[in-house]
């Protein structure tokens, strides 16, 4: 079942175009599917939803506003690591990695100094429980050093066409870094083309057995949207950024990628994503029933196209 979902996701994302496809799609004149109901209420400060199968923007609210995105930053960390590291590389966890996460009050993967863990498992620790300790360890190894790693993150952002994104660290802790809902959708699409990241993002729980190199770890995915059939991607929260969510889901044969930023609560971000997905699913079904899309459908449905 998982392989089937991954194949469908990969096919839709490849169809959507090269890595900067959502940024390009954001400027498209294609109309979104006709909806029989108005867009649902969105309490998030910024939101964006793309139908990657059709290459159309379905919903946009302050999608180009530069804001902090909290731990959605770790999607770029995973993206950069995947382009440099082998999954079987072994990284030694240091006191600095552990101290960085605990001192900043960040979520952790529960790593301890002296553990030696593969890059594959660290990516799970990075993405599922959103471990700032895992982010720091990976950045220190593959920068080498956090400062050089952040340079690589910003280089990758430029290559992906993320014009309104600047990273200041690999974990999303409060900083001068920023991005936009639209840029984060672009990043999500690029990241999910990587089969390893795509597989990790839809994993509910990762169990790492105790070995001579490390202790046992159990990491649970913080993305509650997986319970509703989503296939990723990442949650985030800081007081500055509010509750954030980058998500992807396959509905009715179409793949949707969305971003919710600055939501008021943990439950609200998932509720908003569910409402948007239900709404576009209904719209796609309506389009199939009526047999077409009107030229003014996007405006008529309450959708804002950039």
Image (cartoon, rainbow, N blue to C red):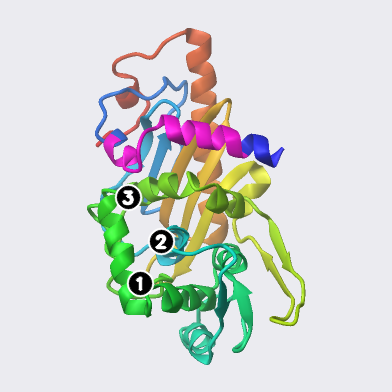
In this rendering, the label closer to the viewer, 3 or 1 = 1
Q: Quadrant of residue 216?
A: bottom right
Q: Look at 55% across and 39% down and name the residue there.
A: 249
Quadrant containing the N terminus is: top right
- The stretch in magenta equals 6-24
Most extreme residue toward the top, as rendered?
291
How many residues crowd mark 3 within 10 Å: few (<14), some (14–19), many (20+)? Answer: many
Q: Is residue 182 above or below residue 8?
A: below
- Disc 3 + disc 1, Cβ < 8 Å: no
Residue 14 percent location from the top left of the image: 44, 34
Q: Look at 69% across and 81% down and name the residue there.
A: 213
> Magenta stretch: dominant SS?
helix
How far is the residue under mark 2 from the one under mark 3? 16 Å
- Disc 2 + disc 1, Cβ < 8 Å: yes
How many residues crowd mark 2 within 10 Å: few (<14), some (14–19), many (20+)? Answer: many
Q: Which mark is residue 183?
A: 3
Q: Look at 51% across and 57% down and name the residue there.
A: 234
Label 1: which secondary element: helix
Q: Is 288 positioned to the left or the right of 67 in the image?
A: right
Q: Which mark is residue 149?
A: 1
Residue 133 percent location from the top left of the image: 52, 78
Q: Is residue 15 above or below residue 246?
A: above
Q: Look at 56% across and 82% down and name the residue there.
A: 92
How far is the residue under mark 2 from the one under mark 1? 8 Å
| Mark earlier in primary sequence (3, 1) | 1
Q: Is 150 positioned to the left or the right of 37 in the image?
A: left
Quadrant containing the C terminus is: top left
Q: Between residues 212 and 64, which one lies in front from this camera angle?
A: 212
Q: Is 130 positioned to the left or the right of 294 in the image?
A: right
Residue 182 percent location from the top left of the image: 33, 47
Residue annotated with mark 2: 80
């Amino acid at each position: 079942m998982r392989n089937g979902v991954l194949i469908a996701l990969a096919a839709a994302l490849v169809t959507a175009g090269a890595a900067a496809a959502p940024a390009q799609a954001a400027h498209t004149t294609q109309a979104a599917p006709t909806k029989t109901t108005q867009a649902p209420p969105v309490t998030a400060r910024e939101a964006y939803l793309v139908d990657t199968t059709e290459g159309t923007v379905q919903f946009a609210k302050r999608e180009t506003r530069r804001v902090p995105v909290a731990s959605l930053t770790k999607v770029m960390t995973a993206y950069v690591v995947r382009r440099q590291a082998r999954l079987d590389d072994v990284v030694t966890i240091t006191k600095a990695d552990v101290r960085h996460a605990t001192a900043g009050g960040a979520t952790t993967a529960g790593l301890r100094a002296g553990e030696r863990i593969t890059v594959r498992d660290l990516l799970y620790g990075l993405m599922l429980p959103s471990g700032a300790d895992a982010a720091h360890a990976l950045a220190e190894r593959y920068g080498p050093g956090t400062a050089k790693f952040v340079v690589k993150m910003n280089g990758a952002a430029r290559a992906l066409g993320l014009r309104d994104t600047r990273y200041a660290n690999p974990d999303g802790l409060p900083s001068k870094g920023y991005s936009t809902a639209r840029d984060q959708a672009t990043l999500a699409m690029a990241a999910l083309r990587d089969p390893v990241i795509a597989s990790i993002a839809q994993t509910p729980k990762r169990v790492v057995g105790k070995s001579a190199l490390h202790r046992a770890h159990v990491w649970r995915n913080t993305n509650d949207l997986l319970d509703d059939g989503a296939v990723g991607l990442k949650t985030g929260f800081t007081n500055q950024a509010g509750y954030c969510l980058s998500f992807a889901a396959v509905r009715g044969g179409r793949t949707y990628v969305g971003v919710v930023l600055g939501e008021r609560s943990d439950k609200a971000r998932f509720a908003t994503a569910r409402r948007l997905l239900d709404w576009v699913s209904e719209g796609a079904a309506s389009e199939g029933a009526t047999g077409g899309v009107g030229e003014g459908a996007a405006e008529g449905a309450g959708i804002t196209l950039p």
